[in-house]
Amino acid sequence: MKKLNALPQRYKGVVQFIYIALSSSHFFASTTTNAFVTTTTTAHFPAIQRTLPLFSEATQSSSEELRDIANRQPPPQNFYELQSDSAKAAQLAIDDGQKLLEVEFPPLPSNVLEMDDLGAYQVAQANLNLAMEFARKFANLDTFKVAILLPDEAEKNIAVENSGGTDKPYPGITISSLRSSDPDDKRIFKPEQLFLNLIGGGSGGLVKPLPNTKMYIIIVASAQELPDVEELNIADPDAIIVFYNLKLDILRGDLGAPAFPAKDFHDRFLSRVKPVYYLRTRQYSRNTPNPPFMVNFQGCLFRSYPGEFQTLLDTGDGRAYRRVSGSKIRPPLGSFKEELTQNLQLEGVIKDEGKFLGFLRTGYKTTTWWEEERVEADDGWRS
């Protein structure tokens, strides 16, 4: 803490916040309690334990052995395990020739993400710190350079300022932006760029590959900025692009809205992005006619390449999960919820209400448009 006191005042809040968050020993630590924890049925849920070696420790194994380990791999318990496992999963996908990778997980412990005073810049700074650690697993000053890209130069400058004032925080790693303006153009406001953004006319040549860069890690980009990533992929098709904690599930939902890319953007580009390390938690509530009358439950959809997509049920404390099912194909969120509900019915926590009441709860449509079968879309995003 002595070093923290020596920092300028504008740095102290961000540095202290990130230090507290990342030093959390439990990745899934949460202040939320599940209503069904008080019932006797849930006390018998067997939890997934990390009794097998860390996936990141599996080396010199056959593809079948790696897949078997990944299929049984539980979610990480802390950020150290998360960083090791996500980097290993990405490396295995790269070895298989994948170029467009998705890495998705909560950037901060769940109890921190639930704080009312948590700001967007604090989440962005956490993602930047995690992206730098991820990049260090791959970067090599001579043979493999990595660039962490923010959407524009303004956000890049903020990130650089909060990272010690340098755009090269580690050997072989550069912090830059998707769009790089002409250094001779001193204008603050560029109306032609605003016009191109509104009509979806691209960057106007502002997206340019960085020399000798083998991997780009994209952070804090919005749906409106994703076409710049496609432009980068076209300009540098041999480079690896990592979509890092962009919440692509949410961004896909914005496609087709006014001033956003059209839905065919998913078909031609986003559908090719392979989820190599995917961890998303969901919380649900269910009314019951008997005590406790309200059942709160949560689950986790987890995938570590080359393993299956695992549907996991929280056993009640936010730290251990019970495997419900596994699938080679990524389940829609509606199917994911239904798998958790059916498992709770088997355990006697929730009673089966019959097909009619079940239909009234779920409706006739349980998938979003991009989760449906689309003729022109690639299957990479779901496999």
Image: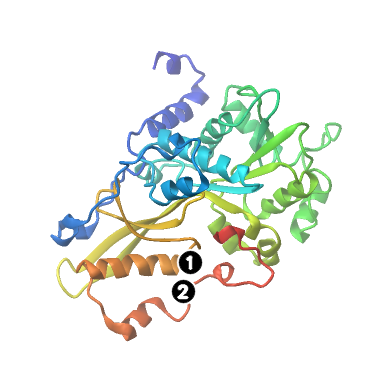
Residue furthest bottom as drawn: 356
Residue 164 higher or lower than 51, as above or below: above
Q: How crowded is mark 2: few (under 14 residues within 10 Å), some or many (20 or more)?
A: some
Q: What element carries label 1?
A: loop
Say whether residue 378 is left or right of residue 316: right
Task: Tell me residue 271's x, y (percent).
Answer: 63, 60
The numbered mark at residue 366 is 2
Say whether residue 35 is left or right of residue 251: left
Say whether residue 365 is left or right of residue 205: left
Residue type at mark 1 is Pro
Q: Residues within 10 Å of mark 1 (few under 14, many from 20)?
A: some
At x 21% / y 59%, what residue is drawn? 35
Residue 260 higher or lower than 133, as above or below: below
Q: What element carries label 2?
A: loop
Image quadrant occupied by the N terminus:
top left
At x 78% / y 32%, what residue is drawn? 211
Instruction: Work out whether residue 295 can be spotted.
Output: yes
Residue type at mark 2 is Thr
Q: Distance between the residues labelled 2 and 1?
A: 8 Å
Callout 2–callout 1 Cβ contact below 8 Å = yes
The quarter of the picture where residue 155 lies is: top right
Residue pointed to by mark 1: 332
Task: Tell me residue 145's x, y (percent).
Answer: 68, 30
Residue furthest right as drawn: 184
At x 83% / y 48%, what residue is drawn? 204
Image quadrant occupied by the C terminus:
bottom right
